[in-house]
Amino acid sequence: MTWVAVLVSAAAGYLLRLAGLCLPARWVSGERSRRVAELLPVALLAALVVIQTVVGGDGRLVVDARLAGVAAAVLAVAARAPFLLVVFLAASTTALVRALS
Amino acid sequence: MSPALRRRVLRDSLTVGATTGAYGVSFGALSAVSGLSVAQTCALSLLLFSGGSQFALVGILGSGGSPAAAVTTSTLLAARNGLYAVRLAPLLRLTGWRRLLGAHIVLDESTAMALAQPRPDAARFAFRVTGVAVFLLWNLMTLLGALGADALGDPRQYGLDAAGPAAFIGLVAPRLRGRDPWLVAGAAAVLAAGVAPFVPAGVPVLVAAGVALAVGLRR
């Protein structure tokens, strides 16, 4: 099933790009489609942050060492740290909290 | 295009390509610890080749979400590449096999670099160099990350379960300019957490996408 998900999402992603190069611009140039296109990634990414930080396998809220790592990531982003450093700080903070508790 | 402009575009595009491609290592590692094989991980970087979509797909599969929810979220995130392509089409004017290949390197970075240029020929050059540089490095670093994570053992010991959300924070931060993005991010986060106990894994993220539609489509 994982291979199916990999290949279907790859095909869908490619077709969206190709369609964009082929479509007449006036079909999708409205102010609203531009706004939705800008806001859609924001909504999806914000939801993913919360789900992967404070939601457990059963869907219930849990607070564990992940939250400390994500807090470190927020501080790092606010300090304009580069992407890899943000990810590294989050992982090492979580590992540290987990080792200490 | 003057030689000076060409040199500047080349330098800027390669810099962007290198810095963006480098974080393929975090995708490779995260994908491997989410339970995907090295081959599946590399296939995603080669064929899907869109950071946000790739992180989302492996994150949802790794947390027990259905393949359908994972594919839907990944595809919604990839939809912005289609809109970038619409903006780029009159600038790039690609035809035939060049269009088929060019479509694959329509990304956040190649679009931003192309649209930042003062002339169409410089824009086409920046698009090509940035897209190809990101592609090569992203795929190389994905492979290294996946092989490295496979060799590590229990990922939780290294805090790698916090790497996914940290990556999403890094991806969303540059988009949080102005009131609407903050409003959407806050509402999407609260809604996703609120519905999570009642729906299957992967679905809360799709429910949250509705917030973007509601805010984006209002007058």
Image: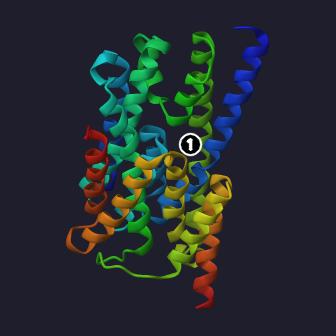
In the rendered structure, which amino acid carries the disc numbered 1? Asn
Residue identified by numbered label 1: B139
Residue A53 percent across, percent down from the top left: 45, 71
Quadrant where the C terminus of chain B sits is: top left
Q: Residue furthest top?
A: B1
Give the vertical position of B182 relative to A35 (above or below): below
Q: Nearer the viewer, residue B18 or A69?
A: A69
Locate residue A83 relative to residue B204 in the image: left or right.
right
Residue B144 percent across, percent down from the top left: 62, 53
Q: Residue at x 68, y 58 (%)?
A: A79
Give the vertical position of A95 relative to B139 (above or below): below
User: Residue A32 occupies which quadrant of the picture?
Assistant: top left
Q: Residue at x 41, y 33 (%)?
A: B81
Locate residue B210 relative to residue B23 in the image: left or right.
left
Residue B147 percent across, percent down from the top left: 58, 58
User: Residue B145 occupies which quadrant of the picture?
Assistant: bottom right
Q: Residues within 10 Å of mark 1 (few under 14, many from 20)?
A: many
Q: Residue at x 67, y 54 (%)?
A: A80
Residue B87 percent across, percent down from the top left: 43, 22
Q: Residue furthest bottom?
A: A101
Q: Chain of mark 1?
A: B
Q: Please indicate, yes or no, whether residue B24 appears anywhere in the rendered image.
A: yes
Q: Please indicate, yes or no, whether residue B79 appears anywhere in the rendered image.
A: no
Quadrant where the N terminus of chain B sits is: top right
Q: Residue at x 60, y 24 (%)?
A: B116
